[in-house]
Amino acid sequence: MSNETLIDLYKALIKPRMIEEKMLVLLRQGKIAKWFSGIGQEAISVGVAMALNRDEYILPMHRNLGVFTVRGIPLNRLFSQFQGKPGGFTKGRDRSFHMGSQEYKIIGMISHLGPQMGVADGIALADLITKTPHVTAVFTGDGGTSEGDFHESLNVASVWNLPVIYIIENNGYGLSTPSSEQFRCKQFVDKAIGYGIEGVKVDGNNILEVYEAVDRIARSIREHPRPVLLECVTFRMRGHEEASGTKYVPQALFDEWGRKDPIRNYEEFLLNEEIINEDFINMVRAEIREAIDKGLEITFAEKDVEPDTALELKDLFRQENAIAIPPASNSKTEKRYLDAITDGMRQAMQRHHNLVIMGQDIAEYGGVFKATTGFVDEFGKDRVRNTPICESAILGAGLGLSINKHKSIVEMQFADFVTCGFNQIVNNLAKSHYRWGQNADVVVRMPTGAAVGAGPFHSQSTEAWFFHVPGLKIVYPAFPSDAKGLIAAAIEDNNPVMFFEHKALYRSITEEVHDDYYTTEIGKARVVKEGDDLTIVTYGLGVHWAMEALTEIKGISADLIDLRTLLPWDKETVLNSVRKTGKVIIMHEDTLTGGIGGEITSVIAEECFNFLDAPPVRIGALDTPVPMSSALEWNFLPKDRFKTALIKLASF
Ligand SMILES: Cc1ncc(C[n+]2csc(CCOP(=O)(O)OP(=O)(O)O)c2C)c(N)n1
């Protein structure tokens, strides 16, 4: 290494230490609220960030201040981020290192630790597909490796040859829990063998070792994309966060690792080699001290964030959504619900060359419901990807693709299995735009619903789980024409959309559907039938039950509203109808308690009280799991109870 590189590494190494020392003072003075210290571990963040190219993504954790400083983020912006001031990266919405920046190619963590690694997979996948010779580096602590996300993301990266360096900072503790109570492996490089990937172990307190290893691995990965696990052995010299103390760590360990301090040792080495001298050290330190003081001055002078409710709500989503796309001609063909979804997806794949579909068995096999039959032949294996059974890593990868300029559709084999990827959806996809302005351009396809004799784990209605999550959109078509228009709209939308498609409707209903590509507006209900006696609000299979009931039971003139979008639901259409009819019944296939019907009923009660001639009625499935045998399943489902309630409401 040239003296210049050695000196650059030195300057980069002491900066985060000096910032931290200042932060600890400010903490004692009550000027900052919390601090997660990386003292003792700086050589890893700094070595990694210095070895990578400036346009390569890094996904750091809570002890990686060095990544942020090496990338050259102005200190006042960093301090404003720590202080929740407007000059930070999250408009005061998230704390400390929970931030990302496309400008600096840093993607910060969510608190859940492990999900970072799936996101890294997606970023790397985009590079792999576009043949961009880039490396993505993602950090985890040793404790974080106990999470399923660690396993899933390494597994996905290994089968897909993703160019990711997984950096494990093995500091012996996960919060207060020592390694012996966290895992039984002797060293993490052994785990790499299990994933069929290379593992490299370095002294994480030696900046030269870290830098050289990452530089060598990165050069090789850029040429031959593949994942590599890098274990950096180190020690955390302070508590998990400052308030938590260090009582659980034996003093002997502090003494031992104190002697291995990465900064003092490197400084001594440079002094011994006469590459630097005391004057130089003093000069560099003075420069950094001045930069810190200047940065703090700007941050402290900055006003606090002022709440703006309209902005808070607006920033949930990226707003530049695609405009409505009408069909180019009037040509139509009779299509089943499933074929309409396939058609919409195929045309979207033709239109968006950066759109990737991922799911279990979706490639050659065409998916268990055959929604993607023939796609792999038309669009190739890069864009139509069979995935391992790793819902969490794949949903995280969806966000990663989005970060790296791709759109994605992730198929859950059955909506029930979304539980295994729940965290990525509700905490990562849903919150990322609000937190730091990064949209998650991901459609999650959810083959849903009962009435197919499939029992408790292949039949659930899961839409209400997501209805409560700000930052998501939920669509749920009941007809083939809407299925095509809404899947296209979901794909055109740059935000995360949960797309529910009812399995019992796949092959049971047909409709004339436009052959051309078109979108159906998200957020707008469809009035299926018009009438004056009462209003029926429903969606999915419920729409068909309601149509059947209105045909069977003579003499009820009803507005039948198919919501089509559940989040945001079309209040205007529902409330206008209820104001007209004065009576309303809300019915869904989902279980009653905590179902979407409760929310709709409550808004109707608030907004239409003076127009109501009867109490609003809510009908849902029994509050039990979905039973398998036909008699039990139809007893569980609300179809018959709906008819009884409808007659009762009509004669109220
Ligand atoms: C899913 C999840 N469970 C629990 C926590 C609480 N938690 C925060 S950090 C931490 C320990 C992390 O240990 P490790 O990955 O070894 O990193 P270290 O803090 O030692 O650097 C825990 C349990 C969390 N953030 N996320």
Image: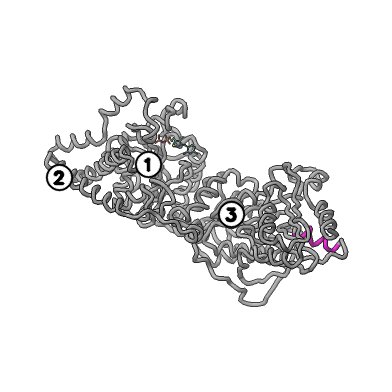
Residue indicated by mark 1: 33
Start-end of magenta stretch: 543-551
Dot 2 amino acid type: Met
The residue lying at 49 percent from left, 48 percent from top is 160
Q: Position of residue 445 (x, y in %)?
A: 61, 55
Q: Position of residue 153 (x, y in %)?
A: 49, 43
**Mark 2 or mark 1, whichever is nearer to me:** 1
Is the CB of mark 2 within 8 Å of ligand 1?
no
| Residue with the most extreme bottom position | 329
Q: Secondary structure at mark 1?
A: loop
Looking at the rendered structure, the kind of residue marked 1 is Ala
Counting residues from the start of the chain, the first of labels 2 and 1 encountered is 1
Task: Kindly report the distance in space between the C-alpha atoms of the residues bearing marks 2 and 3.
Answer: 55 Å
Nearest the eye: 391 or 598: 598
Percent of width and height locating residue 582? 76, 63
Question: In 3D space, how far apart are the residues under numbered discs 1 and 3 (Cα atoms)?
Answer: 38 Å
Outermost residue toward the right in this view: 554
* Quadrant location of the N terminus in the rendered image: top left
Classify residue 412 as left or right of residue 68: right
User: What type is the residue that disc 3 sits on?
Assistant: Val
The residue that appears at 45% across and 53% down in the rendered structure is 435
Whether residue 604 is visible, yes or no, is: yes
Residue receiving disc 2? 283
C-alpha gap between disc 2 and disc 1 = 31 Å
Taking the magenta stretch, the answer to whether it contains residue 545 is yes
Find out whether the residues at labels 1 and 3 contact each other: C-beta distance under 8 Å.
no
Residue 363 appearing in the image: no
- 592 vs 311: above or below: above
